[in-house]
Image (cartoon, grey):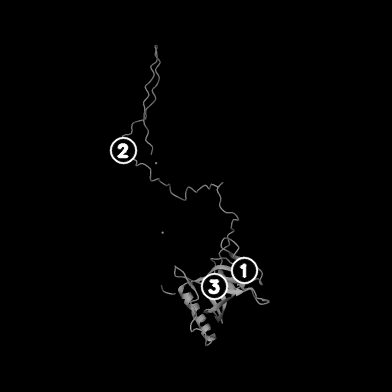
Amino acid sequence: MSYIIENVEILYPRINQPYKFDQTAGDNGKSVPCDAFEDGAKYETKFRMNKDQAKALYVPMAEAYATAKEKSWPDKIDFPFDKQEDGSFIGKAVLKAAYGKDATAKPKQYDAKSKELPEDFKLTTGSTGNIAVTFYPYFMRDAGVSIRLRAVQVTKYLPLEAASPFSAVDGFEIEEDGNPFETAPVVKESAPEVSDEIFEDTPAPVKEPTKVVKSKKAVAPKEADKDLASIVEEWDA
């Protein structure tokens, strides 16, 4: 049974080539590119849905299970999505890169006008799109419906940001000149209060006295000392 999951946020897509989880990569392991015939090789993407979208997807999944159900199978499928604290739901679509000796066809990727994207197009997490899938009901240790990835249509692409190959260390840092018009001057909390009194009855500027030449010894003018003040945010839980 085929189905199109519409207008969802794409999360951690690995579609441009097969990937497998490598426990030795990174601190806790991570998915790395691999050959289609390696153990665990697959294409996959997670996707975020709101409650209405999750319910709309759950119904055809349950119908597909009911149609394929054998007598020994449980009556209902296990809950297929991960509910998040914000009320959204995370689903996953997966396609094994090979079955036996036969490699599977890589999922196609299309733009909003349904034009096929290049083979090496790398979809980014946070982008928005539609996901074409096929349902495969199963019963092993648990009862469920596998969501197999067929194709993705990218309706909103989030550009890929180049990551630095380095980690942060102590040392040289570039100093950026801020735009003086972007923010208002910041007044420090420790600034003393300025009384209006200092602006009242301001004495007239003291003029430097003119020297008077006398026949006898000149008298040096007296200097006045002045102090200056400084102004400083399961479905219904």
**Left or right: residue 95 compared with residue 215:** right
Q: 127 or 51: which is nearer to us?
A: 51
Rendered location of residue 18, percent (x, y): 63, 70
The reply to whether residue 112 is visible in this rendering is: no
Q: Which residue is mark 2?
A: 197
The reply to whether residue 5 is visible in this rendering is: yes
Earlier along the polypeptide chain: callout 2 or callout 1?
A: 1
Rendered location of residue 159, percent (x, y): 57, 63
Rendered location of residue 133, percent (x, y): 57, 77
Dot 1: what SS? strand
What quarter of the picture does the C terminus occupy? bottom left
Dot 3: what SS? strand
Q: Callout 3: few (<14), some (14-19), or many (20+) C-alpha neighbours within 10 Å?
A: many
Q: Are marks 3 and 2 in contact (CB under 8 Å)?
A: no
Separation of residues labelled 3 and 1 (CA atoms)? 15 Å
**Left or right: residue 232 compared with residue 45:** left
Separation of residues labelled 2 and 1 (CA atoms)? 75 Å
Name the amino acid type tagged 3. Answer: Lys
Q: Which residue is mark 1?
A: 19
Q: Which mark is residue 175?
A: none
Q: Which mark is residue 92?
A: 3
Q: 179 or 126: which is nearer to us?
A: 126
Q: Residue at the spot x=52%, y=74% of the render? A: 6
- The relative height of residue 78 versus residue 11 in the rendered view (above or below) is below
